Amino acid sequence: MIRIERRAPMSREAAAGLRLAGVAGALLAGAAFLSATGHDPGQAYLDMLRGAVGSPYAAQQTAVKAIPLALTGLGVALAFHAGLWNIGAEGQLAMGAFLASWAALGLSWPAWALLPAMGLLGLVGGGLWALLPAVPRALWGTNEIITTLLLNYVALLWVDYLVFGPWADPSAFSFPYSRPFPDAARLPLLPGTQVHAGALFVVAIAAALGFVLRRTAWGYEIRVTGHSPRAAAYAGMPVRANVLLVMVLSGAVAGLAGMGEVSGVIGRIQQGISPGYGYSAIIIAWLARLSPWGTVGVAVLFAALINGGFALQTSGVPAAIASMLQALVLFSVLVGDFFVSHRVAVRRGRAAALPAQEAAAEP
Amino acid sequence: MTVHVVLAWLASAVAAGTPLVFAAVGEIVAERGGVFNLGVEGMMLVGAVSGFIVAVHTRDLALAIAVAMGAAAAVALLLAVLTITLGADQAVTGLTLTLFGAGLSSFLGKPYIGIPSPVVFRPVPLPVLGDVPGLGPVLFQQNLLVYASYLLVPAVWAALSHTRPGLALRAAGEDAATADALGLNVAALRYTGVLTGGALAGLAGAYLSLAYTPAWTDNMTSGQGWIAIALVIFATWNPLRAAAGAYLFGGVEALGFRIQAVGGTTPSYFLRMLPYLFTLGVLLVVTMRSRRPGVPGNLGRPYFREERYG
């Protein structure tokens, strides 16, 4: 008789090993899928690795890709700490990019004034877009998973409208993008690299989040609210105000990611700024167990996965394999988490042998 | 506006609402059993792509539908194992299932983009009923899948409210510990609910790729899975209300197309926002009126006999 039963939780080291085994299991499942669909999994993984970190250029591109993943991941993690599901990072990123682009296309300021303005507008755009679902959540408990998600579609259609309509580049026929930003609106590269200065946002926000959550009273309030909103309310904490504030900050960080993409990477606003960063962000934050620096680390891994997926396209494997692998990693880590505190027991003899008799039989 | 235009709009409301009917009714079955499946969008995509691929290769619509439902149920099985047997968090598992389904369908569907399906569901006007003035053109000049949805909705409603297995499923979702004490197999009931929901989401997807807009394009569900989930809340977990809501939402979606068709000057992007904004508005109104209207008591909570309390 095989059954699953509770066990004393594993040591931290063993649990970490189990998580790594989970990642390996996901790669194996991905390999099985690739070979079932007529691809060579060994070659595919090798190509992905090359595409992600195979050259200094590729490695730097992976770092660039990690910036929006880390920022949206940090935003989502902050919301998770307060027990809130921000599935709207995708739309918040788009609205941050929208407001930042408005400044870039409309103001002829010098870089020292324009870039901070764009950063601020990115924060405001994402924050306000997150405020929309935060208000009904705080007042009536409206499920924020669904509202934040639905707003993504609205935000993306809004950007589509702009880049096909009033902001369309007149010299680009009907391509869905605006005219290019002036140089003053482009984030500089970090000296000696091809990585734009948005990487500094990641470092600053991860550090700030770590400090606020662990070292301040407000961070403590957030974590209590996340564990038990009722306990927080009984303790006199302003739960509703914190829900609003956390969602706005979470959206603001995602909006900053949008500013980083249009200013640091693309140099204009266009259709499809994000290939789903806001959705990957949820998996990233979850895998990192909401730890700020952990989120940054997982974001780098996922950036490698995504860039590796793009590299595969040249050899005929659809890049969508990258999103499947992200999902498989989370699934197998969830399986691993279960076995941290459970085990499969094989018992011989009668099913459900009575423990009392077993104990009595032993000397 | 002439009667003619209104009838045409109502008919397209039914056609546009049908995938929402399938998906929302499926999600109701899963949630009534206690499992909150946020993977509807992903399951619909898997159904849409697998049904389309089978139709292209076999020209057999019945087989295409069967495979679409089976494939989506197989994806739902992943969620069932993770959340029911392993007790994983339902929200994060469901969201990831959506990402997985989007990736899988995009991967499998790549060679099929831009190919027309050799076989599609075409409207089959019903004799007699189809000629009833008013109702006929709206309800009974549709395709076979729409007619199937007319039978499905009352059947699921009756099953959930008047049959032993239906009541058992609801018991598992309302109060799993009590259901367990009554000798019901909570895990088996929940698996049944999730797999049924998956199959219906697959049917919704196949409706899109083989009947409504017959073709495969990446992410062709464009959020309808999420609208279906919102619809479940709006319908307070009642299949009849879900169907009514689905046609209402279908009407909003169809309205956008109608306005464009008669030469309206509103940019299409704003018209395409309508279904999402309407869904948001409805959700706000429903939750403003009551905090937890009709939510199954144990929705979202895993059940392990040895960990039960109270």
Image (tube, coloured by chain):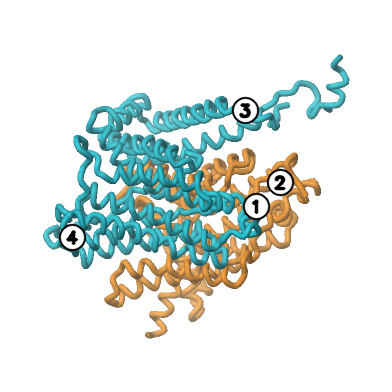
Chain colours: A cyan, B orange
Identify the residue under disc 4.
Answer: A174
Tags 2 and 3 on a common chain: no
Tags 2 and 1 on a common chain: yes
Q: Marks 2 and 3: which is nearer the front?
A: 3
Residue closest to the far bottom: B2
Name the kind of residue labelled 2 in the image. Answer: Val
Name the kind of residue labelled 4 in the image. Answer: Ser
Q: Chain of mark 2?
A: B
Q: Nearer the viewer, residue A44 or A90?
A: A90
Identify the residue under disc 1.
Answer: B34
Residue at 49% x, 28% y: name it. Answer: A20
Vertical order, B116 against A19 (above or below): below
Identify the residue under disc 2.
Answer: B186
Q: Residues within 10 Å of mark 3 (few under 14, many from 20)?
A: some
Q: CA distance from mark 2 to mark 3?
A: 28 Å
Q: CA distance from mark 2 to mark 1?
A: 10 Å
Name the kind of residue labelled 1 in the image. Answer: Gly
For residue B19, say whether it is visible.
Answer: no
Tags 1 and 4 on a common chain: no
Kindly state the secondary structure of the residue where label 1 is placed: loop
Kindly state the secondary structure of the residue where label 4 is placed: loop
Taking the image as shown, residue B170 lies to the left or right of residue B254, namely right
Kindly state the secondary structure of the residue where label 3 is placed: loop
Identify the residue under disc 3.
Answer: A10
Q: Marks 1 and 3: which is nearer the front?
A: 3
Q: CA distance from mark 1 to mark 4?
A: 49 Å
Q: Nearer the viewer, residue B301 or A294?
A: A294
Q: Marks 4 and 3: which is nearer the front?
A: 3
**Which circle's residue, 2 or 1, is located before the other in the chain?**
1
